[in-house]
Image: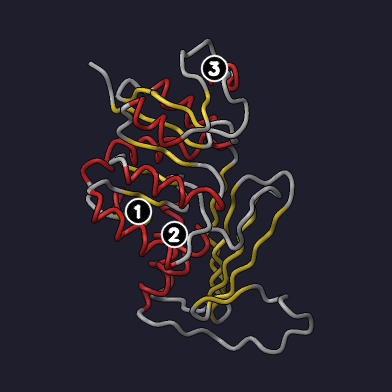
């Protein structure tokens, strides 16, 4: 019996390669397509260090979706390409699991509308690491008791968007948990921007340096005490159990799902 037919968009990227490996090794999934602008025509196996898979890398997403009869597209491409990729998938009735970040509220509303009209489902997750989801959930709990908080996220220097989708999602969960969008006035900045960005009274700080993968600290401060909740992804393999779960669940989740926490918890 064949598994869920999966096409990977952004298959030659750092995370995309791990997604391909995961799909190939999961008996409930079947790799049917690989999309990227690099290494077109080559067998995807040669790019991830395994034997030939019979799946050639292509850059014609619409045609490949149709020819492969994919059921789910997993996208880890780029912020510039992702919306077009999702529109293409939904147009031909293919569900989408998306780890590419950089979405605006308007983008998410468009995806919600497109999903409802097409009948194909979309899951957009800022982070697929189970530990990161627990970090965000614990932060939302802590915020009910320690409302003064800042978020520091640290990523590799090739990450294009800032702050990270994980930081934004964490701030949204904190704001929802405490039922307000207020913060504390810290004071004048001597250098513009040194306090980071601000969202609902929560200061967010982004670090981009080689050596990092994906890391975040949520720091709470109270009278005579601090609380730090931190998560570290030391390998991109950390995202794969969450991606696999999303692929297996998305077919039965109508419309737009924002955040893997909506499935996990």
Marks 1/2: CA–CA distance: 9 Å
Q: Residue at x 47, y 46 (%)?
A: 99
Give the quarter of the figure containing the N terminus.
top left
Asked whether, in this view, residue 47 is left or right of residue 207, the answer is left
Give above or below for 201 relative to 20.
Answer: below
Marks 3/2: CA–CA distance: 38 Å
Q: Which residue is mark 1?
A: 261
Residue with the most extreme top position: 51
Q: Residue at x 33, y 37 (%)?
A: 247
Give x and y (percent) for residue 149: 53, 74
Marks 1/3: CA–CA distance: 34 Å
Q: Quadrant of residue 194?
A: bottom right
Q: Which residue is mark 2?
A: 136
Answer with mark 1 or mark 2, whichever residue precedes in sequence: 2
Answer with mark 1 or mark 3, whichever residue precedes in sequence: 3
Give x and y (percent) for residue 87: 39, 49
The residue mark sitting in front, 1 or 3, is 3
Q: Nearer the viewer, residue 196 or 150?
A: 196
Q: Nearer the viewer, residue 43 or 190?
A: 43
Q: Which residue is mark 3?
A: 43
């Amino acid at each position: 019996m064949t598994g869920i037919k999966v096409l990977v968009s952004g298959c030659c990227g750092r995370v995309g390669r791990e997604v391909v490996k995961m799909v190939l090794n999961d008996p409930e999934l079947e790799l049917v397509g690989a999309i990227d602008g690099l290494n077109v025509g080559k067998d995807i196996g040669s790019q991830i260090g395994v034997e030939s898979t019979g799946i050639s890398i292509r850059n014609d997403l619409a045609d490949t979706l149709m020819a492969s009869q994919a059921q789910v597209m997993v996208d880890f491409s780029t912020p510039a390409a992702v919306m077009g990729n999702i529109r293409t998938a939904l147009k031909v009735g293919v569900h989408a699991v998306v780890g590419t970040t950089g979405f605006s509220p308007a983008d998410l509303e468009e995806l919600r509308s497109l999903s409802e009209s097409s009948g194909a489902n979309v899951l957009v997750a800022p982070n697929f690491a189970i530990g990161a989801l627990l970090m965000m959930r614990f932060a939302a709990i802590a915020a009910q008791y320690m409302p003064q908080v800042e978020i520091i996220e640290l990523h590799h220097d090739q990450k294009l968007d800032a702050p990270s989708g994980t930081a934004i999602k964490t701030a949204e969960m904190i704001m929802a948990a405490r039922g307000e969008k207020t913060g504390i006035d810290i004071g004048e900045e001597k250098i513009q921007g040194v306090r980071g960005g601000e969202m609902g009274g929560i200061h967010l700080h982004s670090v981009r340096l080689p050596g990092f993968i994906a890391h975040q600290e949520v720091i709470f401060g109270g009278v005579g005490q601090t609380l730090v909740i931190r998560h570290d992804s030391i390998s991109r393999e950390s995202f794969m159990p969450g991606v696999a779960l999303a692929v297996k669940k998305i077919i039965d989740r109508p419309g737009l799902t924002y955040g893997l926490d909506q499935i996990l918890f």
